């Protein structure tokens, strides 16, 4: 005998039926479990043709497992960028690192360790992750859209097989119980569907039934999808910033200015789609720099505050305005952000040649080497006569002797001393090759030495002059200035990654705390009474559907009639 469509539908909704859940999102109760393919006849599988192999590769790439692996690799690949100095952030630190690790430098340069985030291998992981996420998200969005439009399914035939189950008889009509069940479950923000006509045979002994099916928790999958879409948004936002923005850095000595032109940058890295003509014509002068140090206790030598006073002009001829540049308080001007990322000392030196003429004069940036701000630098005097002069050495802010060697005992300039080694000869500036201002090419130079053949160390205090000897000239330590390391970025669309991160947090919270659950209430007539069955099923662990079933059962059971009031007769008077 042919079964009715209702009966077939009930059979189809049996939990674990492989025909069920074709359009349910991954993780739903009715979702079809993934089953690895196998050959029905046994034996080795036939070789894949190129097109089939390409499809297999695509399925592997767009699987969630691959996306998670690529996301993990991207995080691991970012670690060198935080441990090793980067050219785009602090070129002076990169220079010092290369000097300290000459053996590792060639290998690190080939691997792009000084520009990790623009290297080929990092970009490859980045692009593969975006492709994997897109290939994973788009099909899931289609499946989720179809699942959301579907109504809650009918109840399984054997509700008693579910772990969270309750049943009781009642004398109420099935329609009354069904209405109360719909009202209760609707108040809990569940999607409701009623199956079965609300009719019963006249003799009251029929088997007609009403099933109220309720479901909640679709936001869990929505949160999961929102999280993955947000990751793509973050990646796209970062990519747009890298294409149309730029990053640069400059060391500016107090009292000097900076104009937003390429020649003013010590390091400049434009995006692929960035054009030099897009540089805004702003400028500023570093009028002063203030730093305060902790002088007592365990934190002695720790900087408490440091800030730079700037006079900023938005364009040539504009009235300048003052700005207090501090850490985490960047200057926003011309679509760019100016950050204070470092500082140091710039000894002010005057070099005179053998004829007494000034060959070099001014402040020179020295790079800090440690927490006490012992700083290394190079001074070049290419216009000295009869021969060019060069100097390299250290600036000690608070000079002292540590185990017989000069050192600094505090980062502030309490007792500044400049220690230099002098050279004469050809600086190599006319060879047509670029030179770093922090490197002295000594291949064609002769060192000034003592009669014993040792390097002649020049120790100068502020205002002191030392003659080099042999009519080569002299050097005067006039004092010192401070300099600030500025990082200047333009990041168009930088709000996009922020929005993506916030959306990812919302999606993650939804996927963690929303618990999908199905509830069924079946009402049927049996032996002249109404039998109510309640069952619930969670599709994630950690919940307790039995508690929910108990609450639903308590709300649906008819209230017990009030106990009859006992009459107490009055006492008779004697």
Image (cartoon, rainbow, N blue to C red):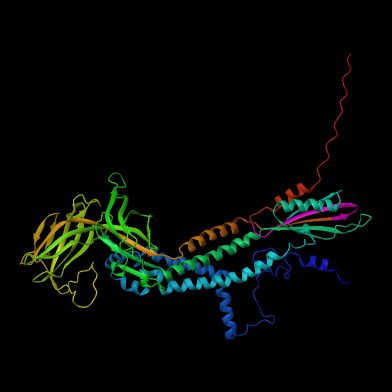
Q: Is residue 525 magenta?
A: yes
Q: Is residue 558 magenta?
A: no
On screen, residue 374 versus residue 272, left or right, reads left
The relative height of residue 37 versus residue 369 in the rendered view (above or below) is below
Q: How many marks?
A: 0
Looking at the rendering, which quadrant does residue 392 occupy?
bottom left
On screen, residue 181 versus residue 317, left or right, reads right
Q: Residue at x 79, y 50 (%)?
A: 180
Instruction: Point out the residue furthest to the right here.
Output: 203
Q: Position of residue 157 (x, y in %)?
A: 80, 62
Helix, strand or loop for the magenta stretch, by majority: strand
The relative height of residue 571 versus residue 114 in the rendered view (above or below) is above
- Residue interval drawn in magenta: 524-541
Where does the C terminus fall, quadrant-wise? top right
Q: Is residue 125 visible?
A: yes
On screen, residue 572 versus residue 299, left or right, reads right
92 or 266: nearer the viewer = 266
Q: Position of residue 7 (x, y in %)?
A: 83, 66
Where does the N terminus fall, quadrant-wise? bottom right
Q: Is residue 113 visible?
A: no
Q: Residue at x 90, y 58 (%)?
A: 206
Looking at the rendering, which quadrant does residue 279 occupy?
bottom left
On screen, residue 568 versus residue 507, left or right, reads right
Q: Residue at x 39, y 69 (%)?
A: 116
405 or 562: nearer the viewer = 562
306 or 406: nearer the viewer = 306
Q: Position of residue 13 (x, y in %)?
A: 76, 65
The relative height of residue 548 versus residue 5 in the rendered view (above or below) is above
Q: Position of residue 486 (x, y in %)?
A: 32, 61
105 or 337: nearer the viewer = 337
């Amino acid at each position: 005998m042919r079964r009715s469509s209702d009966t077939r539908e009930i059979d189809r909704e049996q939990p674990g039926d492989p025909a069920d859940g074709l359009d349910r999102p991954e993780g739903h109760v009715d979702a079809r479990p993934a089953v690895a393919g196998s050959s029905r006849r046994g034996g080795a599988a036939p070789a894949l043709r190129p097109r089939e192999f390409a499809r297999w590769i695509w399925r592997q790439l767009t699987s969630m497992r691959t996306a998670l692996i690529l996301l993990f690799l991207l995080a691991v690949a970012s670690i060198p960028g935080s441990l090793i100095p980067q050219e785009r952030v602090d070129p002076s630190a990169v220079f010092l690192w290369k000097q300290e690790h000459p053996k590792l430098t060639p290998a690190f340069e080939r691997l792009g360790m000084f520009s990790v985030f623009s290297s080929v291998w990092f970009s490859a992981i980045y692009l593969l992750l975006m492709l994997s996420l897109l290939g994973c998200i788009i099909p899931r969005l289609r499946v989720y859209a179809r699942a959301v439009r579907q109504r809650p399914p009918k109840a399984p035939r054997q509700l008693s097989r579910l772990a969270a189950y309750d049943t009781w008889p009642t004398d109420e009509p099935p329609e009354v119980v069904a209405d109360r069940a719909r009202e209760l479950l609707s108040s809990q923000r569940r999607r409701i569907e009623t199956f079965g006509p609300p009719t019963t045979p006249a003799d009251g002994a029929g088997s007609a039934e009403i099933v109220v099916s309720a479901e909640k928790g679709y936001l869990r999958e929505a949160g999961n999808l929102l999280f993955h879409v947000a990751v793509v948004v973050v990646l796209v936002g970062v990519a747009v910033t890298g294409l149309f923005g730029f990053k640069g850095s400059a060391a500016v000595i107090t009292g000097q200015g900076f104009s937003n032109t390429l020649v003013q940058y010590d390091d400049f890295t434009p995006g692929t789609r960035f054009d030099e003509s897009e540089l805004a014509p702003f400028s500023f002068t570093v009028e002063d720099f203030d730093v305060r140090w902790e002088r007592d206790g365990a934190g002695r030598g720790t900087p408490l505050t440091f800030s730079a006073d700037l006079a900023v002009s938005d364009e040539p001829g504009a009235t300048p305005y003052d700005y207090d540049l501090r850490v985490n308080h960047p200057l926003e001007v011309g679509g760019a952000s100016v950050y204070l990322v470092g500082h140091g000392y710039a000894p002010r030196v005057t070099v005179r040649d053998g004829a007494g003429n000034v060959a070099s004069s001014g402040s020179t940036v020295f790079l800090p080497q440690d927490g006490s701000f012992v700083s290394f630098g190079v001074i070049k005097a290419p216009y000295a006569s009869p021969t060019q002069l060069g100097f390299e050495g250290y600036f000690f802010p608070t000079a002292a002797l540590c185990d017989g060697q000069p050192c600094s005992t505090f980062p502030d300039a309490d007792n500044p001393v400049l220690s230099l080694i002098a050279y004469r000869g050809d600086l190599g500036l006319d060879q047509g090759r670029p030179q770093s201002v922090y490197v002295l090419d000594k291949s064609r130079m002769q060192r000034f030495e003592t009669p014993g053949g040792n390097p002649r160390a020049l120790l100068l205090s502020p205002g002191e002059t030392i003659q080099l000897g042999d009519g080569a000239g002299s050097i005067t330590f006039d004092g010192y200035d401070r300099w600030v390391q500025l990082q200047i970025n333009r990041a168009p669309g930088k709000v996009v990654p922020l929005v993506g991160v916030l959306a990812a947090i919302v999606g993650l919270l939804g996927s963690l705390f929303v618990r999908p659950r199905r509830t069924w209430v079946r009402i049927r007539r049996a032996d002249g009474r109404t039998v109510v069955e309640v069952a619930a099923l969670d599709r994630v662990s950690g919940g307790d559907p039995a508690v929910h079933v108990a609450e639903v059962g308590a709300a649906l059971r008819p209230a017990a009639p009030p106990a009859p009031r006992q009459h107490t007769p009055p006492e008779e008077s004697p």
